[in-house]
Amino acid sequence: MRMLLMGNGAIARGAVEGGVQVAAGYPGTPSSEVLGTLAALAPDKNIYVEWSVNEKAALEVAAGASYAGARAMVTMKQVGLNVAADPLMTLAYIGVKGGLVLVVADDPGPHSSQNEQDTRKFAAFAKLPVLDPATPAEAKEMARQAFALSEQLALPVILRPVTRVCHVCQDVAVDENAAFAAPAGRFEKSPDWTIFPGLAAKKHVWLNRQQEAARQLFNSSPFNALYGSKDELSPAGVIACGVSFNYVQEALQLSGISLPVLKTGTPYPLPDEPVLALLRRVDRVLVVEELEPVVEEQVIRLAWRHGLPVRISGKHDGFLPREGEFSVDRVQPVLLAWLCADGAAKGAASGPELPRKEGEAGVHRGQPDPAGVEAAAGISASTPEPPPLPVRPPVLCAGCPHRASFYAFKKAAEGKDAVFTGDIGCYTLGNAPPLNTVDTCLCMGASVNIAAGLYRVEPERPHVAFLGDSTFFHTGLPGLINAVYNNARIVLVVLDNRTTAMTGHQPHPGLGRTAMGVQGKELDIARLAAACGVEFVRRADPYDLEAAINVAAEALAFPGPAVVVMRRECVAVTKSTSRCLIDPEKCLNCRLCIEELGCPAIFPGPEHPEIKGQCNGCGLCAQVCPAGALEEAVK
Amino acid sequence: MSLDIVITGVGGQGNVLASRILARAAMAAGLAVRTSEAIGMAQREGVVTSQVRMGDPLWGALIPSGGADVLLGFELAETVRGLPRLKPGGVVVASAAVIVPVTAALGLAAYQEEDLRNYLRRNVENLHLVDAGALAEEAGHPRAVNTVMLGALAGLSIMPFDAEHLLRTVLDIVPAKYRGINSRAFELGRRAVGGY
Ligand code: SF4
Ligand code: SF4
């Protein structure tokens, strides 16, 4: 059966066909839908699926399942792997019993991330094999085969899809009836599960040997294949990794050029046989891969060790950038420039029309621009410049409770020169005008510790840390304990909107509902804070502006660590039935409602502000209006 | 034969759904298909661009700049922003809807509605400007804009399948109680471009 699947859905399907029994993860764009899909399939396929509090917990849960012989999967985004790095680095030494696959989604661009770290490099650092799919269909196949590979090598295997695989939809063949006869799981006791320096020393030798074993397996992997010109000798060839393969193929086709292209889906450890076979046929090779030169460096090493006189181009000689996402537009001019560099393509590159985006192409340094063709847009060459286009950054939703919480603290801290440290979630958008209430953002759970650190240097200044409910459980809690232990005078505001909103509304321990929909214990954030020793803990409803401002003012005045839980459901979940209307008679057209809040549902009109359909009737603007011109109504 | 469609709009307008419907229709017609869009932060009222590729040959999901056959614009300024993605002589089906961003409401950016509309009229040869919002209301629900736009696209007879096929896909996906509204919205969109 063929289904239209998003890459993440395809990976989940592949995992099911590959016999996954236990899956755990923490949401993070672009990885979240893998676990979401598995959770939806769980009851039918008899799989256990959980959202864990963070990536470290998820990996350890999966490791435990694997120790007992089950096939297990962990999902996260690239920065999540940093949180899981501690168990990962040593799990590589211990090894696994049941196949263990980590899905770590990378985000070249970046589109939705705080950095562009390359998981392939992380895999090489951890000495673990990594698979890099070009399409959702390939990602599914890799997910399916990765469990057996993991068992064969007794190592965790990393599947690293990028955003343009995770969030690409493709028609994919699905086997609804695939069945995997799972062995009955049982943990067999052995000293090999307990890492001590002695075992680590022994296992390090084993781990290094496994690198060669993995390389051998990858030599015959279906995820590596040679495309294009099969001529015995060719002056030039390309090695392309993951999604870059698509861009290379399309660029060659658009340019009417045929070259041997080695596609690799196994960037580490790079299989030597197909690479050497290509290197022996060509004089020059261009390695095309997004982000770090992981494949390129292994190719250089191979060529050097085998004394092959091949010129290897890529990132090290500046043809390709180490940053950002690739596309046909970025790859095509580079490919042509590289071919032209010493005429190796024998004129093949002359003449083709090159559609390309201004400022995106010709990214290589010091190379002549072979394209030299202006962007061929869908409008004629003589088309004038368009009128200025408004910038449209993402903003908090209309009626988002975070807007009200930020505003309450901003009001309470007026004239106090407060610093607002932010965290990872929708609420990072509180940085934008007119709120301007996110002065720092680093990584999950950092807000509270950054505030505490700032406090050490400027103790007279108020420091207010904001983080979300899910982030509080992820890594916020240890920071709070640290602040109490070391008596940092900070205010931690937990923006409790009862969901993990940014990544698509996953549940978390504060709700008690699990990934598979089972209702269990709700962990109460305020009671947790009190149990951590915080002496000032208050709950407030951000929609009640006056009360929220009062609580904020009290918290700011408290001489020790203080916690305020701002609790109100995410409007994207509740789908409100009310809205605000403006009374033109009463409105002074002072525009305070617009200028104070930046709600996307209010915009200036000819006589008075107008309220649009996406208003959720949160009532915040009504509480800001000095004339009482805004009133709640039914949608 | 292959067809590359770029859909532009503002987060929350539902262009991701439009891209899925087109992809399903293509798949049901036996064509290979790829779609791509940035999911995540941009969906909070930011710029959202979807790409749909169908037919043969297909490599990646990203349409080369200046290579799209069709630009389906859900919002006026975003349609203008998307123009460089269109190939020379490509078709633009655009909704006349205007969504003023917060930056403009705060006076930090300008939204020159008339200029943008005139720019499209003067510079796009194959322009079909549709009052999708009004047609959706006429069909029975403001959220039927999506279907109006798909109807308009189908009315141009440039898809590798016919309008009825696309309508069937739409009706397959929407909840049963909204089928009437969506059929009407589709027909209104189709008629708006003279598609009979
Ligand atoms: S009530 Fe006011 S602030 Fe709240 S969503 Fe509606 S317009 Fe925006
Ligand atoms: S999705 Fe929820 S949390 Fe995110 S901006 Fe919208 S209302 Fe706020």
Image (tube, rainbow, N blue to C red):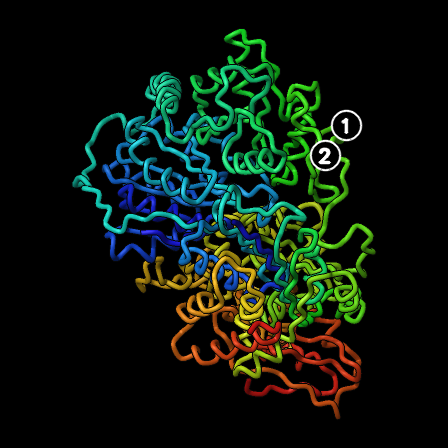
Q: Are marks 2 and 1 on the same chain?
A: yes
Label 2 is placed on what type of residue? Answer: Gly
Q: Residue at x 56, y 31 (%)?
A: A289
Q: Please say whether residue A485 is visible from this viewpoint.
A: no
Q: Please say whether residue A224 is visible from this viewpoint.
A: yes
Tell whether A333 sits left or right of A94. Answer: right
Compared to residue A240, the image places residue B80 above or below, namely below
Residue closest to the eye, A602 or A473: A602
The single residue placed furthest to the top in the displayed view is: A307
Give the residue at mark 1: A368
Chain bearing mark 1:
A
Local crowd size for mark 1, using a 10 Å CA cut-off: few (<14), some (14–19), many (≥20): few
Residue closest to the eye, A442 or A133: A133
Place residue B170 in its image quadrant.
Answer: bottom left
The C terminus of chain A - image quarter: bottom right
* Kind of element beneath mark 1: loop
Give the residue at mark 2: A362
Number of marks in picture: 2
Query: Residue A115 location, x and y as percent?
Result: 60, 42
Query: Residue A613 location, x and y as percent?
Result: 61, 78
Query: Residue A76 location, x and y as percent?
Result: 45, 45
Mark 2 or 1, nearer chain start: 2
Label 1 is placed on what type of residue? Answer: Pro
Q: Residue at x 40, y 64 (%)?
A: A511
